[in-house]
Image (spheres, grey):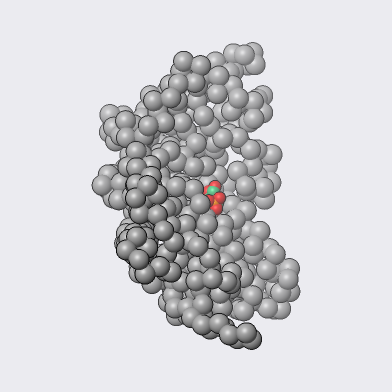
């Protein structure tokens, strides 16, 4: 494990929320897996756009409207470049949930039918599970799951066996699990899916904020993520897709902006990516997200990953000091993203979250939108601490101290 001193990027001061006090205490925020805090540059970029450049896009000929157009296009270019994507195949959605629903409707309803199977995993967030369940029910297809083993990992042998059945049309899975922290072998899975003639969809919600993502190297047909977890604004998600597949797909939502021409009884679709962006898009949010990815780029995603890995290693080491505490997911920080979900014997996870809140520490408790996974783990809920670029080892110390104090309150 790298020395603790390396586990800080020293950027807390970039995030104004950390100036706040709660009952006189500093904010110790360990819930970035739910949403990340925002640096001043993101807040400023969005405010500056609204203050000086606000107009609708793709409609006006006047100078202000053209500024808004340019800002929106430039935002798409920067967001696409952040993960090595092409702006033409980078679609802005409301969040990753909407991106996956777009795929379930536009790709799924046209390509999945009776006798087909959709393969997902037991570790999926509901966002990458419910749309496939609904699709399969509606289309008479089978929804099958790759199992999660006791280490919180998937098995490539099971994947091979499933694909060998010859009926899998789609493999959809998380890059990084929001509960187990597991980093899945994306390139291996997408290569196997492609060889078997299946389309691959990756939910990158937890990966993009904390590690370098290179779409070409990952080889997925579709890759989706969400702005607010990547120090960007809420209300914007991103879908990257294969041009050939996107071209063949029908739109998800219809209305303004996504058309080429409309007559009383007929319509033709706009070109990519606009075909999938019906109505006024999240313009100021796109500008904010571009500032967010610029900020992360400025830190360097390799450094961000190193930081989160060493902080996670430190977190695992310190959490092991708490009697009765069990962490789920891979034991090695190397194999996981920046989070630890855990149970504490004798204390319900919701009580754990409330007890540590008394120490000024924000963590999440519940099923983390992964109820089927909770059943596999044999628990109803877990507590989850997740780190971001601004966290420091002292935040983990505060969590462990608060957990120890909580055990005393429960007389454990
Ligand atoms: C792995 C994963 N997928 C999907 C989502 C859903 O994100 P959003 O609510 O921004 O659509 C989350 C959010 O917690 C997540 O962690």
Left or right: 238 as drawn, with respect to 85: right
The answer to whether residue 77 is seen in the rendering is: no
Seen at 67% across and 24% down, the residue is 346
Q: Foreground: 285 or 194?
A: 285
Left or right: 12 as drawn, with respect to 181: left
Q: Foreground: 102 or 174?
A: 102
Q: Residue furthest front?
A: 62
Q: Position of residue 118 (x, y in %)?
A: 62, 69
Q: On the image, which quarter does residue 106 sit in?
A: bottom right
Q: How many marks?
A: 0
Q: Foreground: 165 or 295?
A: 295
Q: Foreground: 78 or 372?
A: 78
| Viewport quadrant of the C terminus | top right
Left or right: 193 as drawn, with respect to 347: left
Q: Position of residue 149 (x, y in %)?
A: 57, 51
Q: On the image, which quarter does residue 344 sit in?
A: top right
Seen at 62% across and 84% down, the residue is 264
């Amino acid at each position: 494990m790298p020395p603790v001193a390396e586990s800080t990027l020293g950027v807390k001061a970039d995030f104004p929320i950390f100036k706040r006090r709660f009952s006189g205490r500093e904010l110790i925020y360990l819930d970035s897996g739910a949403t990340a805090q925002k640096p001043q540059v993101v807040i400023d970029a969005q405010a500056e756009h609204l203050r000086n450049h606000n107009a609708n896009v793709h409609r006006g000929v006047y100078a202000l409207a053209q500024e808004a157009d340019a800002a929106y296009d430039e935002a798409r270019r920067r967001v696409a470049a952040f993960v090595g994507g092409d702006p033409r195949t980078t679609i802005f959605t409301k969040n990753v949930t909407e991106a996956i629903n777009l795929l379930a409707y536009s790709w799924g309803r046209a390509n999945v039918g009776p006798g087909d199977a959709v393969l997902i995993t037991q570790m999926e967030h509901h966002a990458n599970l419910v749309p496939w369940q609904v699709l399969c029910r509606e289309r008479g297809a089978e929804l099958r799951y790759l199992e999660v083993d006791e280490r919180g990992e998937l098995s490539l042998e099971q994947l091979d066996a499933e694909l060998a059945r010859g009926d899998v049309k789609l493999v959809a899975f998380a890059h990084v699990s929001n509960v187990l922290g597991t980093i899945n072998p994306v390139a291996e899975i997408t290569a196997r899916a492609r060889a078997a003639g299946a389309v691959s969809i990756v939910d990158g919600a937890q990966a993009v904020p904390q590690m370098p993502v290179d779409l070409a190297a990952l080889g997925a047909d579709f890759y989706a993520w969400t702005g607010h977890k990547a120090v960007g604004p809420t209300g914007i998600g991103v879908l990257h897709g294969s041009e050939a597949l996107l071209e063949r797909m029908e739109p998800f939502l219809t209305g303004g902006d996504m058309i080429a021409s409309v007559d009383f009884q007929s319509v033709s679709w706009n070109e990519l990516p606009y075909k999938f962006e019906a109505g006024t898009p999240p313009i100021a949010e796109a500008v904010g997200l571009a500032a967010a990815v610029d900020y992360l780029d400025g830190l360097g995603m390799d450094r961000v990953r190193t930081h989160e890995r060493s902080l996670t290693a430190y977190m695992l080491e310190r959490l092991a000091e708490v009697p009765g505490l069990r962490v789920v997911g891979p034991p090695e920080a190397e194999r996981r993203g920046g989070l630890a979900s855990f149970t504490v014997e004798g204390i319900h996870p919701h009580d754990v979250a409330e007890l540590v809140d008394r120490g000024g520490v924000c963590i999440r408790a519940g099923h983390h939108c992964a109820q089927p996974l909770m059943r596999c783990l044999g628990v109803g809920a877990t507590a989850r601490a997740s780190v971001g670029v601004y966290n420091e080892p002292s935040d983990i110390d505060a969590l462990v101290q608060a957990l120890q104090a909580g055990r005393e309150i429960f007389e454990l």
